[in-house]
Amino acid sequence: MKYVSYVVAGVAAAATGAYLFVYLYRWEWQRALTSGVLLLIIEVFLVAAILLSRLGRLERRLGESETRAEEIQRRLQQSREAAPERFRWLDTRPFEGREDRNDTFVFVPVLMAAGAVLSVVAFIIQKIAGATGRAKAERVLAGRLASLAAPPGGVRGDAADIAERPAVPPSRPGRTFFKATAGAVVTALLASLTFFLADTIQTHPASSPDTAASTVVFRVTVRNADTGPVRDGAARDLWETCRRSTAGSREHAPLSSLGDGVYAGVVRPPLPGHDMFRLRGCLTDITANRTTAVVLGDGQIPPAP
């Protein structure tokens, strides 16, 4: 389920990013902002999901470690409690609290004296044995181990020495070339997309086409108040706002109603192709006072003969 959510979120992020670039290309700024916010939300969701997964894994590991430590501690306590009582003669409890009332404390100094005497005797024996039998014992041991020694050149005389072997194996040229080529191609595509988008959304100086005027036909809908006067006022507000979004100053831009919520706007002097694209995007994207517009068509009016 976790991987399915990752796949769904990745597909949604890719689609949202694609629509973000599409809306930027179409000069539909409100929709581009909405797509950007959705993309940011999806990215935050993915990061939070990954962090929560890692934290849950660490929490499970800590829980397992604590459980294991408690189990080991419990076993140690059980083994310590089940151990029999040894060396009762070293017990210092009063006689009234002990089952064995025999006084064996006198055994301690006797044991210590005997241990000291035995240590001295063992030291003397070790010195005598080392002085008399070490050389012969070493020769006998060397003779027995001669058959187990490796040959002078080693088990594999032609094997390379450890110092001659490289610490890190050399990289594969084919894989390195593939990675470099893929990185260069991806970088070139991203750079091309960036320059294309920047060139598309910025304003360019352009001369007006050789026509009399430019016209745009669009339909206006006002939610919950789609009446004639209200719709005419809303269409006028949309038209005045969007015609000012073009690069040049267009003083003559009348708007006429064609009936049934359809309006035609005429701009003089005519708009270049880039400004017409901006005007269409503004009319499609803008929303003001529950008003939406749908562009039905646009074109250039030829000059009078």
Image: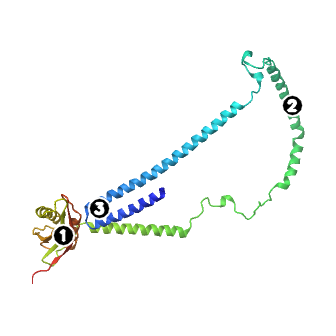
- The residue that appears at 87% across and 51% down in the rendered structure is 144
The three-letter amino acid code for the residue at tag 1 is: Phe
Q: Earlier in the sequence, mark 1 or mark 2?
A: 2
Q: Which residue is mark 1?
A: 218
* Residue 30 percent location from the top left of the image: 26, 60
Q: Is residue 277 left or right of residue 68?
A: left
126 vs 226, nearest the viewer: 226
Q: Residue at x 71, y 31 (%)?
A: 82
Asked whether the viewer can see residue 282, the reply is yes
Please tell me which residue is depicted at 58% across the width and 43% down the height of the picture.
65
User: Relative to 109, is 178 on the left or the right?
Assistant: left
Secondary structure beneath disc 1? Answer: strand
Q: Residue at x 23, y 70 (%)?
A: 277
Front disc: 1 or 2 = 1
Q: CA distance from mark 1 to mark 3?
A: 21 Å
Q: Residue furthest bottom?
A: 305
**Residue 245 visible (yes or no):** no
- Badge 2 element: helix
Question: Which of pointers 2 and 3 indicates the residue nearer the eye?
Answer: 3
Q: What amino acid is at disc 3?
A: Ala
**Circle nearer the N terminus (2, 3):** 3
Q: CA distance from mark 2 to mark 3?
A: 97 Å
Asked whether disc 1 touches disc 2, contact meaning CB atoms under 8 Å apart, the reply is: no
- Residue hosting label 3: 32
Above or below for 152 versus 180: above
Task: Tell me the crowding category of disc 1: few under 14, some 14 to 19, or many 20 or more residues within 10 angstroms, Cα based.
Answer: many
Q: Position of residue 191 (x, y in %)?
A: 36, 67
Quadrant of the rendered image containing residue 183: bottom left
Could you say where residue 164 lies in the image, as x and y percent from the top left?
A: 66, 61
87 relative position to 46: left or right? right
Residue 177, percent from left and from top: 51, 69
Q: On the image, numbered disc 2 is attached to which residue?
A: 124
